[in-house]
Amino acid sequence: MLKKIPVEHLTLGMHLEGFCGAWLDHPFWRTKFVLTDPNDLTLIAESSIREVWIDISKGIDVAASHAEGSQAALTALEIPPEPPVVQERATFSDEIKRATKIVAKGKEAVVSMFQEARMGRAIEAEAAAPLVEEISNSVMRNPGALISLARLKTADDYTFMHSVAVCALMIALARQLGLDETQVREAGMAGLLHDLGKAMIPLDVLNKPGKLTDEEFDLVKTHPEEGHKLLLEGSSVSDITKDVCLHHHEKIDGSGYPKGLNSETMSLFAKMGAVCDVYDAVTSNRPYKAGWDPAESIKRMAEWKGHFDPLVFQAFVKSLGIYPIGSLVKLASGKLGVVIEQGEQSLLKPKVKVFFSTKSQAYIQPEIIDLARSAEKIAGREDAAKWGIKDIDQYWAGDNG
């Protein structure tokens, strides 16, 4: 039996079943757990959440003195579903603020899941469903914001942030491929949990700043199968999530691992996972190398024959743009700029923030140019190092980076 109660009536020993309010408004990434820490009561009281659902079959009931004022409407066998909210299109600058909160809470969730996996606890995919929903909604409001933000990560939090990034990339790709919303969320969950097996790899190997030895690389290559084992022991884990976890390092020419699958034997979702995993890996800064420019990454990945399914890769490029957010480009006028938002009509005409003149070889007053409404056009990609430019991400991410 579930009861809806004011947060003031919460006590230790109660089993929280759900919060009445937005996922981002409450202080935990999980929504179902037994209250055992007084600090958790304080966090809930200090949040904007005013009511919660408790399960009295899994924890203690509300005090009799409070129960007298309860109404029959406050009990239920299951939490009534929230009415669907239409996700209105948002500007990049508006969505990046919300995406910052989602990414931070998403990282917290992945860190927690990895820790639980290391301790031998079964994975509960259902607990991560609200996170996938939030990421999905953010990508729907503005595809570029969260995807670009999740690319910014330190070497220490790479493994966790990579999971959040691949979740977002899988969602965007699934929508581009025309999959239904149930499959979109399945793809997102698969992206979130695809690297769970790395929880079983020693941290000194996972975060090694130099090149791995052959033995260490062989150890890292066990993570798809290790993750698959963990998911088999978990609850509410879909076949799609298990498939992507096991097969995201496969290649269509059969040279991948662990099973040596090919284009005929790889599922659509495994092909999607292969593209999204590699893109985020090569565009991220790692202990042993700097990340590639997003547009340069798209170009190089397109040249890797036998790695990715051509149709899936084509859809992936359409979902991100030929010049993804964060790409450094040179305009025909000689100005350098960073792509800050995709154009609605053409992949070749994004919004660009120019900040450097190659003619005078000097920084200029930053200016946003919408190439869809300008005579300017992109002459090509540019290498920041060639011009001595550092931290170009500040020009699109600002304080959120």
Image (spheres, helix red, strand yellow):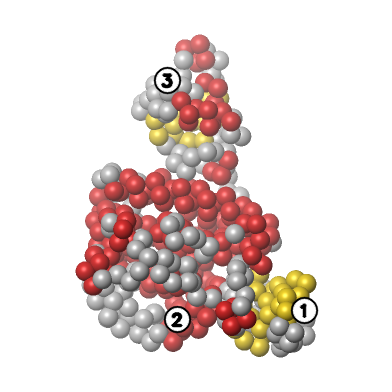
Q: Three-letter amino acid code at disc 1?
A: Arg
- The residue singled out by tag 1 in the image is 373
User: Mark 3, residues whose alpha carbon is within 10 Å: few (<14), some, or many (≥20)?
Assistant: some
| Secondary element at image label 2 | helix
The answer to whether marks 1 and 2 mark residues whose Cβ atoms lie closer than 8 Å is no
Please indicate whether residue 320 sits to the left or right of residue 95 in the image.
left
For mark 3, give the secondary structure: loop
User: Residue 224 location, x and y as percent?
Assistant: 28, 64
Disc assigned to residue 61: 3
User: Above or below — where is 401 with respect to 53?
Assistant: below
State which tag comes first along the sequence, 1 or 2. Answer: 2
Disc 3/disc 1 C-alpha distance (Å): 62 Å
Q: Position of residue 217 (x, y in %)?
A: 27, 69
Q: Position of residue 204 (x, y in %)?
A: 31, 58
Identify the image quadrant of residue 264: bottom left
Q: Quadrant of residue 309?
A: bottom left
| Quadrant, the C terminus | bottom right
For the residues marked 1 and 2, what is the alpha-carbon distance in whole angstroms? 30 Å
Please report the residue visible at 75 percent of the width from the left and 71 percent of the height from the top.
366
Amino acid type assigned to the residue bearing label 2 in the image = Met
Closer to us: mark 2 or mark 3? 2
Q: Is residue 81 above or below residue 146?
A: above
Question: Does residue 56 appear in the picture of this structure?
Answer: no
* Residue marked by disc 2: 301
Pointers 2 and 3 in contact (CB under 8 A)?
no
